[in-house]
Image (cartoon, rainbow, N blue to C red):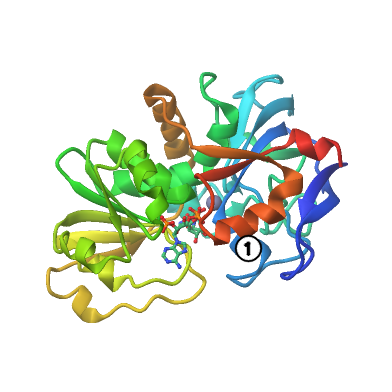
Amino acid sequence: MYNVKAYSATSETSSLGATTIPRRDPNEYDVQIEILFCGICHSDLHSARNEWTGAIYPIVPGHEIVGRVTNVGSGVTKFKPGELAAVGCMVDSDGTCVHCKEGLEQYCPNVILTYNSPDKHLGGVTYGGYSDSIVVDERFVLRVPSKLDLAATAPLLCAGITTYSPLHHWGVTKGKKVGVVGIGGLGHMGVKFAHAFGAHVVAFTTSPNKKEDALQLGAHEVVVSRNDNEMQQHAGSFDFILDTVSADHDINAYLNLLARDGTLTLVGAPPTPLAVTAFSLIPGRKSLSGSTIGGIPETQEMLDFCAEHNITSDVEVIPIQKVNEAYERLLKSDVKYRFSIDMVSLRSE
Ligand code: NAP
Ligand code: ZN
């Protein structure tokens, strides 16, 4: 065991600050990674502030991790010291259930998340990527294509895969009309992927100042969702809508935009329940569904797809000392479009 620097919250009302956490020495199949960049996901904020309940303190958030391998266990075959590597939202799973066997580890009942999950090695809970280094079983470590910019790649490990996976699962391709609701970290990646998959993409935003950007990101049309007129022009027309909104909002307004047999998938996870009227779904045989991140094979596929198509996240790189300010800005939808922490800044703490 060794100690590393990290940033943690010690209660749901405290801001994040510098601390020290333990990491295990690499076991036979472990990869030790020096963390170079870590994205800030809205889930980090929900978790640090215990908005979903279940937070165990101190909590060290961060599940959009890229870095360099510093050491590997004797049984590791996929990685060598000096190589780039990435870790997303999961660090372990049982490996034996039907979900794991299909490469859908995110649905494993025994999945171990990167932070705030039981740590079978050291006891207590797992600690995330707002830290100097991390030790992870090689099955949960991803390869980073060398041509990608690292700061802009980190967000792919959550925002990227969380939008890539449902767009694929629900068959978004050329000829489909797709909506992406909320142009934040997830949403801006959803627009990029839906565009790359050939769909006709409509971005929905509450922020008129994101209109031009959304077109640049790949949307064919942008709707300011607070404008009823603009919304009504799209009534009954969408094959698929991906909802990435982090707070309570009127989901019926979007269900009404689905065509017959259309699907609205929630990836945004507001802490309070969303109200759905039956008559938003019944006429038109519409579906409301959810999706969480993506499995390890699909995450690797997504990273390779990004390298091939030159896709990364639009990031604002910040030092870790600005993380609390970044959380406040996230709440104001004031980020274009993902904060990526340059972890070198933690070395000076
Ligand atoms: P984010 O960067 O804060 O983006 C959320 C966007 O939602 C905002 O930029 C804003 O877009 C819109 N929004 C915010 N408040 C709103 C409100 N009151 N009404 C309407 N729209 C509002 O957050 P993120 O990191 O993309 O995460 C989004 C959500 O997905 C969070 O709840 C997060 O926990 C969840 N998440 C889920 C998964 C999963 O596996 N399912 C993975 C990662 C994250 P506009 O300014 O364009 O309106
Ligand atoms: Zn996330």
The reply to whether residue 282 is visible in this rendering is yes
Pinpoint residue 207: horizontal percent, then vertical percent: 41, 57
Task: Report the label total.
Answer: 1
Q: In the picture provided, is 97 more to the left or to the right than 172?
A: right
Of residue 153 and residue 305, the one placed in the foreground of this image is 153
Q: Is residue 307 above or below residue 133?
A: above
**Camera sees residue 294:** no
Q: Is residue 306 left or right of residue 316?
A: left
Above or below: residue 111 compared with residue 304? below
Residue at left offset 19%, top offset 79%: 279
Residue at 63% in and 59% down: 328
**Few, some or many residues within 10 Å of mark 1 (<14, 14–19, 20+):** many
Residue 208 location in percent, x, y? 38, 55
Residue 263 picture quarter = bottom left
Name the residue beneath numbered marker 1. Answer: 47
Measured from the top left, where is residue 71 in percent x and y?
A: 76, 26
Q: Residue at point 24% right, 68% down?
A: 228
Question: Can you give x and y, in whole percent of width and height, for residue 4 in the image?
Answer: 84, 42
Pick the residue in front: 318 or 138: 318
Q: Quadrant of the N terminus?
A: top right
Q: From the Cβ of disc 1, is ligand 1 less than 8 Å away?
A: no
Indicate the amino acid at tag 1: Ser
Question: Viewer-proximal residue, 57 or 121?
Answer: 57
Q: On the image, which quarter does residue 197 sit in?
A: top left
Does residue 339 lie above or below 146 as drawn? below
Classify 159 as above or below 261. Answer: above
> Residue at coordinates 12% horizontally, 68% vertically from top-left?
284
Which secondary structure lies at badge 1? Answer: helix
Considering the image in quadrants, where does the C terminus appear?
top right
